[in-house]
Image: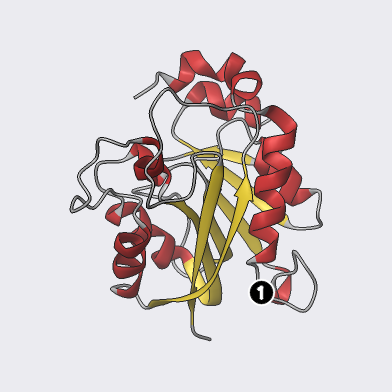
Amino acid sequence: MLDYDREAARYDETRGGLPRARAAARAVRELLPGSLPGSLPGGGTLLDVACGTGLVTRELAGAGLRVLGVDASTGMARLAAGRVPVVLGDGRLLPVRDRSVAAVTTIWLLHLLDDARPVIAEAARVLRPGGVYVTTVDKRAAHDASMPVDRRPADGAATVIEAAARHGLRPCGETRFTGHGQSTSEAPRPDLPPPGLHRLTTSGRGG
């Protein structure tokens, strides 16, 4: 795992920068409820967990969403604070009240974890009725050709959907977007999207 405090200053330039952030934000907006792209019921807040430098979060805010970033890295949160409202916090213990936000996103987080279930449980806890949880999935396996087919990575789509269902969230959408500015020395898994093609899934809580 990277030291994200040290990585913060160069993170954007080594991870595709603004083009990648805009592609991710557009994909997230496709999965949000409402009659218009990017709208949320009742003008609610979108909580971006592991927001990093806040570049994707800022793009979501620019679409008229009220956003709040959360990150466990002081260095990342410091950079994000120049772009969006942000608080320090762990995705496994969010500093947010029960059923208080309209949407939660975890973009490029779950593949870094050994166990994503605590993060998914927290996302479900803070979502209000009618809210949605949007996350990237299958990133880890797509980059790792050596991973056994029968091993279920923390960010595997089936694993994430199953964990979300335990907390009352049901699948309600999926999309993909092309990444920018990243490459991998690993051969891609032939049974999954190529590493540059990011897959998102969304789960909703009934109102």
- Name the quadrant of the N terminus: top left
Image-based side of 196 in relation to 44, left or right: left
**Looking at the picture, does residue 2 appear above or below residue 88?**
above
Outermost residue toward the front? 190
In the image, residue 166 lies at what x, y percent?
28, 73
Q: How many marks?
A: 1
Q: Closer to the camera, 166 or 17?
A: 17
Residue at the spot 46% in from the left edge and 27% down from the top edge: 73
The scheme the figure's colours follow is secondary structure
Q: Is residue 204 visible?
A: yes
Secondary structure type for disc 1 = loop
Q: Closer to the camera, 118 or 186?
A: 186
Q: Closer to the camera, 185 or 153?
A: 185
**Looking at the picture, does residue 174 appear above or below residue 118?**
below
In the image, residue 135 lies at what x, y percent?
49, 55
Q: Closer to the camera, 8 or 179?
A: 179
Q: Residues within 10 Å of mark 1 (few under 14, many from 20)?
A: some
Residue 81: quadrant of the picture = top right
Residue at the spot 66% in from the left edge and 19% down from the top edge: 13
In the image, residue 109 lies at what x, y percent?
44, 42
Q: Which residue is mark 1?
A: 33
Q: Is residue 82 visible?
A: no
Image-based side of 138 in relation to 131, left or right: left
Residue at the spot 44% in from the left edge and 66% down from the top edge: 98
Image-based side of 149 in relation to 134, left or right: left
**Looking at the picture, does residue 86 appear above or below residue 15?**
below
Disc 1 residue type (three-letter): Pro
In the image, residue 111 lies at what x, y percent?
37, 42
Residue 174: quadrant of the picture = bottom right
